[in-house]
């Protein structure tokens, strides 16, 4: 547990010293939202919950694949992966620590996009927005695990940056469907009980990706030199 | 276009695709086998050469 | 040599089955009452789909065995099945589209089955991209197995979520594929023979693909051996 926290803390401290990842992800999210406002933007003064929900999930996918996919790759570039693999932390723990770091990065970028979307799509800062934020956070758990695993799987390949979205997005489809629907409903004023079905789908995705990471991360980092 | 002709083209498409894949695999395998022969002959030649050198 | 003969025998049997299946599809089976002759595309569409799904299941199971036991043959089987599966899955989408156009009046619709099949196709195209990007050998095999397993675990959730998405969404099409009802015994027989024929084609292609992967693994071994021998002979 302490070793896990240490690895997570290390990533967070590196990020705090020079916030490269989060600023880059926030900027990319901003650009995504701008493009989507051009496409589906609200008429003067009107709020567009469906378009806003879609935009937020596009931002999540883009920032997650860009940023989350790097949390393991960066250790390879810095040649620190062996030290991590040799550390007393078991592979499942390493996976948890790394996806927690990815989760933090995604969450920061997503919080930023939520604020931007609030302005761009004329949303109200009310309980509906809070529920939407909860749905997004729930989706981010699974996505952080998924991109960490997939980023490690494709980490040594040529063209890694293309590979991570190519592998992660189709796997994430069920969560995307559930997440977009649940956020649109939540922004439209639905209570959590009314979107329970979609939340269950999101939870099962989280469970699958985290379980897959815990079980298979060992295979992915084994023999990496 | 009658439905039977439409159907004929649909099936043609399926078979052309399957045959192309088959052809690609067979060509690739023929290349592999030729390369295997060539490489094993060279390995054999080098081995006997080395064996004589050791004696 | 016996292996080569077996492959040839399988090839000949497959060709024979194919001819029989085609005869049954075009001549023996009666035309369907509402859809007419276009319905005959279904006799290959369904077997192609069954084979594609079976192929992806093989990829997952063989990948699991590879991670467990480590024999390269399991990985070769997994890779070969994924590649053949993508070929068959592409044909499923194409034949489905060719069927949908005259019956539904559109090439593509986001029906739950179409969407799920399309996502499945995307997943395994991703698998092939991963294998192509990674070097051959142990690393690629293990990463492929991991991805194959995650994809297989994901597929049930994809199917459920897509179905939920479509049922909650206003139904665009009332005519579903439920019009499968094969009224005539000759239709059932035709479907069965096509099923066997398409499965045989798949088996044949799969065996051939595994053979190419085995040959390529041996080639890599020989090339390494050759390099070592050349170095040794230079030192002498």
Image (cartoon, rainbow, N blue to C red):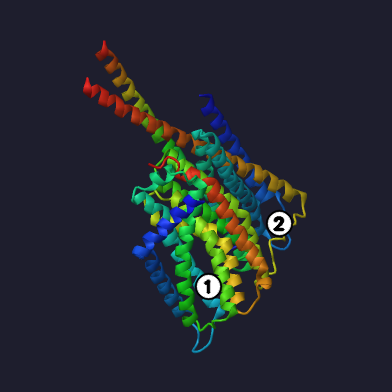
Q: Are marks 2 and 1 on the same chain?
A: no
- Is disc 1 placed on a helix, strand or loop? helix
Residue C188, above or below B47: below
Eye-nearest disc, 2 or 1: 1
- Is disc 2 placed on a helix, strand or loop? loop
Name the quadrant containing residue C102. bottom right
Q: Give the image location of residue A139, x and y in percent.
A: 55, 64
Left or right: residue A117 versus residue C57 is: left
Q: Give the image location of residue A106, x and y in percent.
A: 47, 65
Q: Pick whichever, A7 or C234, lies toward us.
A: A7
Residue at horizontal 46 percent and vertical 59 percent from the top: A102
Q: Could you tell me how far apart the alpha carbons at marks 2 and 1 are, in whole angstroms?
A: 45 Å
Q: Which label belongs to residue A54?
A: 1
Disc 1 crowd, CA 10 A, few/some/many (<14, 14-19, 20+): many
Residue C4 visible in the shown view: yes
Q: Give the image location of residue C108, x and y in percent.
A: 57, 65
Left or right: residue C205 versus residue A225 is: right
Disc 2 crowd, CA 10 A, few/some/many (<14, 14-19, 20+): some
Name the quadrant containing residue B55. top left
Q: Give the image location of residue A33, x and y in percent.
A: 45, 75
Left or right: residue A200 versus residue A11 is: right
Residue lying farthest to the front in this orientation: A2
Tell me whether circle 2 and circle 1 mark residues in contact (CB < 8 Å). Answer: no
Q: Which label belongs to residue C31?
A: 2
Q: Pick whichever, A51 or C45, lies toward us.
A: A51
Residue at horizontal 42 percent and vertical 35 percent from the top: C216
Residue lying farthest to the top in this orientation: B55
Residue C172 visible in the shown view: no
- The quarter in which the C terminus of chain C is drawn is top left
Residue at horizontal 66 percent and vertical 50 percent from the top: C25
Q: Pick whichever, C110 or C164, lies toward us.
A: C164
């Amino acid at each position: 547990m302490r070793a896990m926290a240490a690895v997570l803390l290390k990533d967070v401290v590196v990020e705090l010293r020079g916030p490269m990842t989060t600023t880059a992800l926030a900027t990319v999210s901003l650009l995504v939202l701008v493009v989507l406002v051009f496409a589906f933007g609200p008429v003067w003064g009107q709020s567009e919950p469906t378009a806003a929900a879609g935009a937020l999930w596009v931002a999540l996918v883009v920032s997650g694949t860009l940023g989350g996919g790097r949390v393991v790759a960066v250790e390879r570039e810095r040649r620190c992966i062996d030290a991590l693999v040799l550390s007393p932390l078991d592979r499942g723990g390493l996976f948890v620590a790394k996806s927690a770091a990815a989760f933090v990065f995604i969450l920061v970028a997503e919080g930023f996009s939520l604020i931007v979307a609030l302005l761009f799509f004329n949303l109200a800062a009310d309980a509906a927005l809070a529920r939407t934020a909860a749905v997004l956070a729930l989706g981010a758990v699974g996505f952080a695990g998924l991109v960490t695993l997939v980023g490690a799987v494709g980490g040594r390949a040529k063209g890694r940056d293309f590979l991570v979205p190519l592998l992660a997005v189709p796997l994430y489809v069920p969560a995307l469907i559930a997440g977009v629907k649940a956020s649109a409903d939540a922004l439209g004023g639905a209570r959590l009980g009314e979107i329970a079905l979609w939340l269950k789908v999101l939870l099962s995705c989280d469970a699958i990706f985290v379980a897959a990471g815990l079980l298979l991360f060992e295979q992915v980092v084994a023999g990496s030199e | 276009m009658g439905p039977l002709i439409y159907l004929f083209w649909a099936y043609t498409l399926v078979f052309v695709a399957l045959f192309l894949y088959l052809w690609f695999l067979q060509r690739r395998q023929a290349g592999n086998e030729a390369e295997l022969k060539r490489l094993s002959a060279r390995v054999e030649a080098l081995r006997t050469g080395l064996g004589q050198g050791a004696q | 040599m016996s292996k080569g003969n077996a492959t040839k025998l399988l090839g000949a049997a497959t060709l024979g089955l194919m001819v029989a299946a085609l005869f049954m599809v075009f001549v023996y089976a009666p035309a369907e009452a509402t859809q007419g002759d276009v319905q005959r595309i279904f006799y290959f569409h369904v077997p192609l789909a069954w084979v594609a799904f079976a192929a992806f299941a093989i990829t997952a199971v063989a990948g699991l065995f590879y991670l467990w036991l480590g024999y390269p043959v399991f990985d070769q089987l997994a890779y070969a099945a994924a590649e053949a599966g993508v070929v068959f899955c592409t044909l499923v989408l194409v034949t489905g589209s060719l069927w949908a156009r005259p019956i539904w009046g559109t090439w593509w619709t986001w029906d739950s089955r179409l969407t799920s099949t399309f996502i499945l196709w995307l997943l395994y195209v991703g698998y092939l991209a991963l294998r192509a990007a990674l070097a051959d050998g142990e690393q690629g095999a293990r990463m492929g197995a991991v991805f194959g397993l995650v994809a297989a675990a994901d597929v049930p959730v994809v199917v459920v979520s897509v179905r939920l998405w479509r049922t909650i969404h206003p139904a665009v099409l009332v005519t579903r594929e439920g019009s499968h009802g094969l009224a005539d015994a000759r239709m059932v027989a035709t479907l069965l023979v096509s099923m066997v024929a398409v499965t045989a084609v798949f088996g044949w292609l799969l065996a051939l693909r595994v053979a190419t992967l085995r040959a390529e693994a041996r080639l890599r071994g020989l090339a390494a051996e050759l390099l070592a021998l050349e170095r040794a002979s230079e030192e002498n």
